[in-house]
């Protein structure tokens, strides 16, 4: 079965104001399959004019049918989108596997997560409200939660469905009208999402999708004078540009950037329970995960044992085409492969303890990289400091709890951390001491729950998505003070 069989819409069009339109410039980009390098579709190369049209359509939606809908009606539409996503889970998974290179079961999990975001936010739409505030005699004071207006959503290629779900889903819940710019390297599920939203009866202009290059469509969107909020997920470098654009326009911005997330393993931990989490969190999606756990901090007394247990898993790991549904797929692009290989070249072979195997017969045009485990890494080593965005993990030994905290907090990032110990007091001390947006105790990621607020500190970004918390971020609080004597 080819990708074309699953494309039930025209991927060369943008979705603007409820209609599918060709890019004004008539130019197209080639979308590639990371598993073999073949072209899977052409997409529109949207530019300023297309972004202008999308923002205008969103603005009009706010005063049209979408803007007049009740929270209940918005919630019902989101829930319907979730149902339609569930009906199409298999084709969405195949599209994502072909587009991003992720093994089919991971792509499927992402599609299910997208549906779950729609269900969660659909159900939440009419359950978020303002307050009344006891005030001076003769006054009634209350607060209203209102949409920002037009929200811009700039999404990376690594988890398109999940990030669209958490960002666009929450924004629509609160009544914003959205403009989505997916990454040029992975657009198919963003366009599928628009098609499904259209089928679910989402009013025209509530969701607009413009594909194109980051420096063209993305920059045009983030600097557009008529947007009222920006949600960006991606690299620190582009995040900084986005925040500058938001500063010029004085609009709020949510930045979900990278990480160097640690898992900290004490000598009383249940290693059999920990090992799958320690390894999977580093290699899932070929390590191209903002919350990838690329640092494993291990108490020295169990360092040798844990290193060997992780190494064993690496040696058994198979890498190959997404459709083969092995442990790990290819990296997204030749460029990404070059970046990851650059780190490995620079580190040298001496501290590599194990590598996975790329299966024989993996297509030459695919961007395969064998997951690589390093041990005995110094906390200041580039492998322990820089986000690699590939399946590379560094084991770092420590002696005391204080050392563990210092090392864990010793990078510019703070997205996710986990603590493996059965000492309850230590769990509490560590959870307080670690600078991170999320802390997991004796697990990692807690199944990725859509209910769990997510976001970073430091260079990992700011603002929170997921859960109810996102709904506060995607709305503005208005205070009404009425004097009635
Ligand atoms: P990226 O280069 O920052 O791109 C992210 C998005 O921004 C893409 O849609 C991109 O479009 C767009 N973009 C690029 N240049 C732009 C510009 N000048 N103005 C406006 N938009 C622009 O990141 P990436 O390479 O796609 O993803 C990898 C990075 O994202 C990693 O550092 C990772 O940690 C981070 N990430 C973080 C999270 C999180 O939730 N914290 C999740 C996923 C990824 P094009 O692709 O079309 O250029
Ligand atoms: Mg692609």
Image: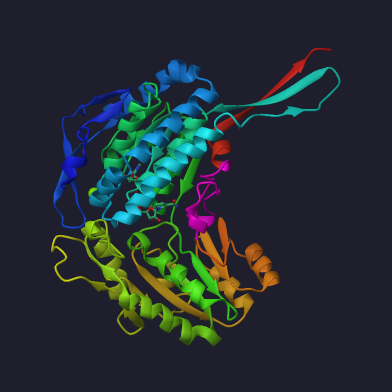
Residue 135 can be seen in this image: yes
Looking at the image, the residue that sits furthest to the right is 137
Of 34 and 382, nearer the camera is 34
Which residue is painted at 26% across and 67% down in the image? 319
Q: In the image as oriented, which residue stretches furthest toward the top?
A: 484
Percent coordinates x, y for residue 263 in the rendering:
51, 69
Q: Is residue 471 above or below residue 93?
A: above
Would residue 196 be found to the left or right of residue 475 on screen? Answer: left
Viewport quadrant of the C terminus: top right
Q: Quadrant of residue 286?
A: bottom left
> Camera-side residue: 226 or 135?
135
Residue 81 location (% of width, % of height): 40, 33
Q: Which residues are magenta?
A: 445-469
Q: Residue at (13%, 64%) from the top-left corner?
A: 364
With 229 as the anchor, is 366 left or right in this view?
A: left
- For the residue pair 443 and 167, the one nearer the viewer reads as 443
Number of marks present in the image shown: 0
Q: In the rendered image, which quarter is residue 468 located in?
A: top right
Look at the image and name its color scheme.
rainbow
Residue 148 located within the stretch drawn in magenta: no
170 above or below 332? above
Q: Is residue 30 visible?
A: no
The one nearer the camera, 476 or 314, is: 314
| Residue 121, x across and y down, in percent | 51, 36
- Left or right of residue 99: residue 106: right
Residue 452 versus residue 267 in the image, above or below: above
Image point (25%, 63%), residue name: 337
Residue 436 x, y percent position in the rendering? 56, 59
Look at the magenta stretch and give its main secondary structure: loop
């Amino acid at each position: 079965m080819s990708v074309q069989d699953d494309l039930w819409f025209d991927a060369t069009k943008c979705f603007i104001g409820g209609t599918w339109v060709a890019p004004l410039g008539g130019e197209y980009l080639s979308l590639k399959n990371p598993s073999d390098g073949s072209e899977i579709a052409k997409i529109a190369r949207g530019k300023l004019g297309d972004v202008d049209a999308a923002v205008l359509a969103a603005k009009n939606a706010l005063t049209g049918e979408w803007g007049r809908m009740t929270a209940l009606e918005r919630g019902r539409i989101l829930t319907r989108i979730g149902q339609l996503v569930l009906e199409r889970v298999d084709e969405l998974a195949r599209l994502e596997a072909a587009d991003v290179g992720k093994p089919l079961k991971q792509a499927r999990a992402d599609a299910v997560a997208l549906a779950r975001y729609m269900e969660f936010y659909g159900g939440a739409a009419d359950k978020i409200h303002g307050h009344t505030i006891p005030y001076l005699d003769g006054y009634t004071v209350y607060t209203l939660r209102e949409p920002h207006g037009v929200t811009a959503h700039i999404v990376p290629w690594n988890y398109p469905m999940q990030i669209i779900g958490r960002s666009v889903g929450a924004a629509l819940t609160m009544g914003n009208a959205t403009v989505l710019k997916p990454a040029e390297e992975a657009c198919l599920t963003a366009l599928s999402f628009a098609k499904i939203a259209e089928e679910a009866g989402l009013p025209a202009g509530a969701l607009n999708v413009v594909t194109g290059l980051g420096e063209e469509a993305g920059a045009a969107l983030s600097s557009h004078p008529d947007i009222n909020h920006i949600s960006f997920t991606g690299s620190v470098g582009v995040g900084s540009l986005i925040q500058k654009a938001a500063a010029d326009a004085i609009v709020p911005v949510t930045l979900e950037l990278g990480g160097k997330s640690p898992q900290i393993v004490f000598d009383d931990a249940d290693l059999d329970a920990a090992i799958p989490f320690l390894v999977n969190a580093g290699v899932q999606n070929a390590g191209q995960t903002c919350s990838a756990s690329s640092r494993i901090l291990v108490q020295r007394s169990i360092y040798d044992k844990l290193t060997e247990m992780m190494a064993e898993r690496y040696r058994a790991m198979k890498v190959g085409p997404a459709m083969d549904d092995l442990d790990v797929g290819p990296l997204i692009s030749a460029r990404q492969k070059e970046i990851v290989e650059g780190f490995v070249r620079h580190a040298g072979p001496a501290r590599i303890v194990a590598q996975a195997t790329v299966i024989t017969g993996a297509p030459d045009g695919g961007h395969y990289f064998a997951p690589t485990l390093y041990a005995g890494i110094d906390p200041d080593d580039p492998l322990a400091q820089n986000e690699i965005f590939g399946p590379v993990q560094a084991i770092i030994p420590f002696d005391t709890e204080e050392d563990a905290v210092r090392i864990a907090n010793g990078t510019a990032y703070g997205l996710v951390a986990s603590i493996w110990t059965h000492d309850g007091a230590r769990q509490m001390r560590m959870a307080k001491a670690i600078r991170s947006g999320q802390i997991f105790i004796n697990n990692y990621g807690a199944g990725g729950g859509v209910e769990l607020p997510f976001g970073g500190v430091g260079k990992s970004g700011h603002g929170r998505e997921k859960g109810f918390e996102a709904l506060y971020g995607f709305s503005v609080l208005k205070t009404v003070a009425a004097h009635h004597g």
